[in-house]
Image: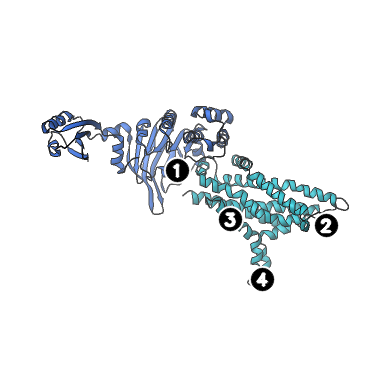
Amino acid sequence: MWVIYKKELTTFFNNLTGYLVLGVFLTVMGLFLFVFPETSLLESNFASLEPFFEMAPSLFLFLVPAITMRLLAEERQLGTLALLLTKPIDEMSLVIGKFLAAVSLLFLALVPTLFYYITLYFLGSPVGNLDTGAIMGSYLGLLLLGSAFASIGMLASSLTESQIVAFVLAVTGCFLFFYGFYFLSGLPVFFGKWDALVQQFGMDYHYHALSKGAPDTRDLIYFLSVIAIFLLITRFVLQYRIRS
Amino acid sequence: MSVRVEGLTKIYGEQKAIDKLSFQVEKGQILGFLGPNGAGKSTTMKILTGYLPPTEGSVEIGGFDVQENPKEIRRLIGYLPENNPLYGDLYIKEYLHFVAGFYPIKNPSARVSEVIDLIGLTPEKHKKIGALSKGYKQRVGLAQAIIHDPQVLILDEPTTGLDPNQLVDIRSLIKALGKEKTLIFSTHIMQEVTALCDRVLIIKDGKMQANDTLQNLQSTFQGEWVTTVTFQGPFTLEHFKKIKDVQRIRQIHPDVIQVITLPGIDVRPLIFKQAVKDDNIIIGMQQDRRSVEEIFQKLTGSDIQ
């Protein structure tokens, strides 16, 4: 598993995907939070990172599929999947190794944003007047959300040889899981009776719950289950669809 | 370490890709797997490596069943897949280190350098794989297959698309590797089989056509000698058919005929005398024993490349 992990991580930074992802994420975030007046942290009357956590999922919606689209589709296209799967490694380790590499890249993208937190910490009046708990919760939520997106991206990437198709599938999948259930709950069938329940299937519901600063195990379990389910389906695809 | 295949069958949907294949290879032997394109060579090899599950039958490598002990099997075998897939954006060393990481190798760096030397990659060792010529790419493919010094080597068309010089190099490499290992390779090139193999396995449409040593195959199919005669100008075919011991005559060109006899019978003097008698001019005459190419054509009913 770590062989795969190491290779994927080096590949991210060898072919510039890694730098591109970090660069785009940090540039866009920086522009919105410090330059554009409407969303600027500096113009706001409150010392809060909320604008960051509101925007980050929409950015992840495109960035995460861009990271994951290559991971399995390229192996299929090159034929190297046959090579990997005849090495002493099982499908699950292959999937997890690649998945963890993608998550690590997301983690690396989030680390520099702690700078926003430090900025706000000193901007607060008095200094340090900041809901640290809520921010840590939000970070956890963002990382879990990114990981869940990555697991959807892995599945999309395993289904096709084309990276573009994998990207489009992954964006669609992430979008549906993030906003889809919220919109679904507005249907007349559910509205007023089941809407709260339907919303709970969506990622945004749990993401926002986590950002309140009191991590609830239910939200953790939700994200971990989603990740596990998508990775297992990916493994299943590798095992039964490709190898037969 | 022996490879034992018993009643192997693979069915894709309605189509039987391979049909009840059984054979066995021992250590130090090179088995040539011969068949026209689409005969089921690659499918069989994928099953041998455990990559594909068979529909029926079993593969045993060194006493391990491939389906039941995938991890042990994968350590024992080195596999070069069809079309030699590689990561073009990695450097040779980087790639071999990556592959070495899958196996319990004590000193990977030393082993990688050793294999680079052994395979003859030294002059190119600082290049990216994508920048290599086809011959060198093929060597990288072979290098990754032997990085863990496997007991069994399975090479799927290791010489496809190489130029004649590269061919000779890769063949001598295969020959050297085959001395200490159990080696199975597939090809649709005849000379390769004559040059390398101890045993030949010929398949067509997934069915075994022959499984024998090269010598036996040649003597079994040496049922006839063929004398090719080239004339200048007209000749009377009927007269030559009457020559003693001639079994039949094929006219393969307006000026060229092939006279077929039983082995051991040289009809060239008689053909010459007949030609002189008829006042025909012979400008060429050559006697051949049936070649591997022809055995292959006879067994598979297809043209070779």
Q: Which amino acid does the dot numbered 3 rest on?
A: Val
Cα gap from disc 4 to disc 2, whole angstroms: 35 Å
Marker count (numbered)? 4
Residues at marks 4 and 2 on the same chain: yes
Q: Secondary structure at mark 1?
A: helix
How dense is the environment of label 2, judged by Cα within 10 Å: few (below 14), some, or many (20 and up)?
some
Disc number placed over residue A191 in the picture, else none: 4
Residue A168 falls in image quadrant: bottom right
Q: Chain of mark 1?
A: B
| Residue under numbered circle 2 | A46
Spatial distance from mark 1 to mark 3, Cα to Cα?
32 Å
Q: Earlier in the sequence, mark 2 or mark 3?
A: 2
Give the chain letter for blue.
Answer: B
Residue A154 image point, x, y percent: 59, 51
Q: Mark 3, chain letter?
A: A
- Taking depth in this image into account, of B66 and A54 the one nearest to the observer is A54
Q: Quadrant of the N terminus of chain B?
A: top left
Disc ID at residue A168: 3
Which one of the lettered chains is coloured cyan?
A
